[in-house]
Amino acid sequence: MPAKIDPFYAMEINRLAHRLKAEGRSVIHMEYGQPSTGAPQKAIALAHRVLDSDGMGYWESAALQAGLARRYRESYGLTIEPERFVLTCGASPALVLALAANFEAGDRVAIARPGYVAYRNVVKALHLVPVEIACDDSTRYQLTAGHLEAIDPPPAGVIVASPANPTGTIIEAGELDAIARLCRARRIAIISDEIYHGLSYVGPAQTLLRYDPGAFVVGSFSKYFSMVAWRLGWLLAPAGKVERARAFSGNMFLTAPSLSQHAALAALEARDELEANVSVYRRNRDLLLEALPRLGLNRIAPPDGAFYFYIDVRHLTDDSLAFCKRLLRDTGVATAPGIDFDPVDGRHHIRLSFAVSTSEIEDAIGRLERWFASPPRD
């Protein structure tokens, strides 16, 4: 029987936003988790040179794998064999590979609720069983070792995300260690989604590999490196499962885009430009932290990293999709409905991305202040 997959409702909001823009409306796109900046200038320049000189083809860049290994050594103090980096067409295929390489049909995989929409749906698409764990402000909307210890029987696996989507929360080092210890004791395989590493406002996020060398780690050039449309990511697989992951990758996805791999080599060296982007996000975050309470939006997850606010709007609606559509039509500010991230309580939440320019944030705040002064209620 085909798996039942839920829609990604933020895409519905995005389609409406583009329709309104085509009609001449001014729209501020805060519905998608993507930087408004483009790829680093060094990456673009190198891509131009490659286009003029290289016909390209199916390829996995050993130089890029080595560059990623160097980054892990510099960022986390870990020595990783370059061959363990399986380059993928973005982080989404890396998640598919990690799940396919680890589990059999019918296996149970724990995920946080709220959590990224694709976790639940990709798990179901692979005929696995999502075990959604309700998380709230008592654990900063994150899974804990206590959550996993309470599941009986234990799941076959767990997906951990830090910083998380949609909340931006980061799991502290001590809790990561506790999760790794608990999972070893209960034989729970860990997939760690670390695509927002580099985007942190409270100190650097720690990789789960520091506490569990056998974890699968999903990474991406889309977020910190601002290369969304280049569709490039990686799966960092444990030594004993690299070949299994490569077998799935070759059959399902062939190779990552060659041009993107060339450009990514230069992106790894564009630290100053990329850190300037983070400074913009930090300023945007500060502006919203100050403005949202003025709008009566006091219940938010602490955005430690990534570039999201997950906002409780239960005093205004119990239909977040309809609320986001109305907000977009009335103000031109596009946001994502919480039902993407939490099929139970997400009807009371919206997600707002601040990965846009500071001038757009200031414009959005002005529009929202006027609207929330007398917002319509369901």
Image (cartoon, rainbow, N blue to C red):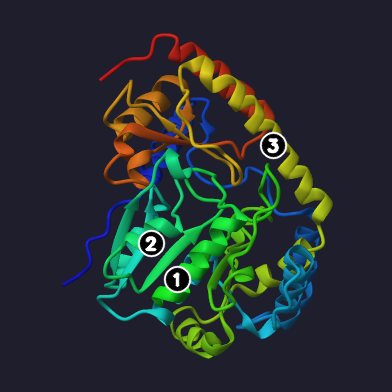
Q: In which quarter of the image is the C terminus?
A: top left
Tell me where residue 140 appears, x and y as whole percent. 48, 43
Q: What residue sits right under mark 3 in the picture? A: 282
SS of the residue under disc 1: helix
Front position in the image: 239 or 316: 239
| Left or right for 82, reference 314 | right
Q: What residue sits right under mark 2 in the picture? A: 148
What amino acid is found at the position of numbered circle 1 in the picture? Cys
Q: Are marks 2 and 1 in contact (CB under 8 Å)?
A: yes
Q: Is residue 51 visible?
A: no
In the depicted structure, whether residue 296 falls above or below residue 184: above
In the depicted structure, whether residue 252 falls above or below residue 33: below
Q: What residue sits right under mark 1 in the picture? A: 183
Front position in the image: 44 or 32: 32
Count up the numbered dots. 3
Separation of marks 3 and 1 at Cα, in angstroms: 34 Å
The earlier-in-sequence mark between 3 and 2 is: 2
Q: Can residue 164 be seen in this view?
A: yes
Tell me where residue 187 appears, x and y as whole percent. 41, 77
